[in-house]
Image: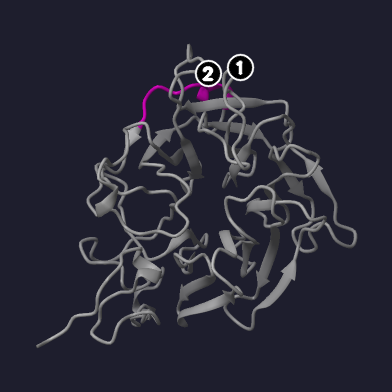
């Protein structure tokens, strides 16, 4: 894909909820049924988690430590705040995977992200709330979660939704999306889902009292009757100097009949944007005005990942995983859902595709 930013390339991949390992050698994602977790690495393309039914897994993330071959997954139905969702760790993904559950209590736990050392995990949960509000928590031991000697501490506290959290590569800040700024009188969540009013915030991992709003989807003078927007799925770039996010600030398609068919889209988050931040002073990142638009498309980009590695030819389709050692990237993974004639399946593309026929 063509990128409007000179130093940033764009590549579109199969599936959803993409996550790339810190060294860029492993790509993980889920299919559009939200049923299976896929990994592409030097061993090829394969599943490392298979749910019992559709809409049973979402929100996956690699451990940031290069020494830990661990993938975190949220197991349970998406967009269902009243349903139980647990966070699992898939350890030794490149070898013989071992699956471990990290959360308990029957709460809705999701969107895990480890610190750079890979020793702690931030996530969002409905625990401590009877009205299904969501706040951020930290597992102090990423290996055992909240079992055994493991404990969970609270990072944010309020009757709102804090979600889509990611720990910065430097380890000092955590970025997340939140509705904490919605105006008085705004509609209550419907079946656990908020009517937009999302903005991007930074919080200091060591001092949760320090919270700064970075980008907002609302007018400062907005009232409860105005149409709010979504600013969601924030991710840091590898050096922690920029944040990419998705938003409907630039509107969405008016021709949904021609859009891809996704089983669990939730809502159209719109295009991808980025914002440059000051990595040294969190307070200098309050309500940044300069925002870069990265994509301009009628498709809704809702999940994305940022990595350092680049392919040899940026104009070719990303059908081959590219590693830091280009000489070893000599395989072409085959999608198990591919039609015999080579056509891709809706499981991965989101499109309803008819196999080619010859008369």
Q: Quarter of the image holding residue 58?
A: bottom right
- Reading the image, the residue beneath label 2 is 224
In magenta stretch: residue 167 = no
Label 1 close to label 2 by CB (< 8 Å): yes
Q: In the rendered view, does 185 fall on the left or right side of 100? A: left
Q: Return the residue nearer the eye: 149 or 277.
A: 149
Return the disc, 1 or 2, that comes first in the chain's sequence.
1
Q: Check the image and report above or below for 64 versus 185.
A: below
Question: How many labels were placed on the picture?
Answer: 2
The magenta span reads 282-291
In magenta stretch: residue 283 = yes
Label 1 packing within 10 angstroms: few (<14), some (14-19), many (20+)? few
Q: Quarter of the image holding residue 159?
A: top right
Residue ID at (75%, 66%): 101
Label number found at residue 184: 1
> Dot 2: what SS?
loop
> Dot 1: what SS?
loop
Q: Check the image and report above or below for 54 versus 126.
A: below
Q: Return the residue nearer the eye: 30 or 194.
A: 194
Q: In the rendered view, does 259 fall on the left or right side of 132? A: left
Residue ID at (72%, 29%): 158
Residue ID at (50%, 44%): 233
Q: Quarter of the image holding residue 181?
A: top right
Residue 93 position within the rendered picture, expressed as x and y whole percent measured from the top left: 60, 75
Q: Main secondary structure of the magenta part?
A: loop
The image quadrant where one finds the C terminus is: bottom left
Residue 176 position within the rendered picture, expressed as x and y whole percent measured from the top left: 58, 38
């Amino acid at each position: 894909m063509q990128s409007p930013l000179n130093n940033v390339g764009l590549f579109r991949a199969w599936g959803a909820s993409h996550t790339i390992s810190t060294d860029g050698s492993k790509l993980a994602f889920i299919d559009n049924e939200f049923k299976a977790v896929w990994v592409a690495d030097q061993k090829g393309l394969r599943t490392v988690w298979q749910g019992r039914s559709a809409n049973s897994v979402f929100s996956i993330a690699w451990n940031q430590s290069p020494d830990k071959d661990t993938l975190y997954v949220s197991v349970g139905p998406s967009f269902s705040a009243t349903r139980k969702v647990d966070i699992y760790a898939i350890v030794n993904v490149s070898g013989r995977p071992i699956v471990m559950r990290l959360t308990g209590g029957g709460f809705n736990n999701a969107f895990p992200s480890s610190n750079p050392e890979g020793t702690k995990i931030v996530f969002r949960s409905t625990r401590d709330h009877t009205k299904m509000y969501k706040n951020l928590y930290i597992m102090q031991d990423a290996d055992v979660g909240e079992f055994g000697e493991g404990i969970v501490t609270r990072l944010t506290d309020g009757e709102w939704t804090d979600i889509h959290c990611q720990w910065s590569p430097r380890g000092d800040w955590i970025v997340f999306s939140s509705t904490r700024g919605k105006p008085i009188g705004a509609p209550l969540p419907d079946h656990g889902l908020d009517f937009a009013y999302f903005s991007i915030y930074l919080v200091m991992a060591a001092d949760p009292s320090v919270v700064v709003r970075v980008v907002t989807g609302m007018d400062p003078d907005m009232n409860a009757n105005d149409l709010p927007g979504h600013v969601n799925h924030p991710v840091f770039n590898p050096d922690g100097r920029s944040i990419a996010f998705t938003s409907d600030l630039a509107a969405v398609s008016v021709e949904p009949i021609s859009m891809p068919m996704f089983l669990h889209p939730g809502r159209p988050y719109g295009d991808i944007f980025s914002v440059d931040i000051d990595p040294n002073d969190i307070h200098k990142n309050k309500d940044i005005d300069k925002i870069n638009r990265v994509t301009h498309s009628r498709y809704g980009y809702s999940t994305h990942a940022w990595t350092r590695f680049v392919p040899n030819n940026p104009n070719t389709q990303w059908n081959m995983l590219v590693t830091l050692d280009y000489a070893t990237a000599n395989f072409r993974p085959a999608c198990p859902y591919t039609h015999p004639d080579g056509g891709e399946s809706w499981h991965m593309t989101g499109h309803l595709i008819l196999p080619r026929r010859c008369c």
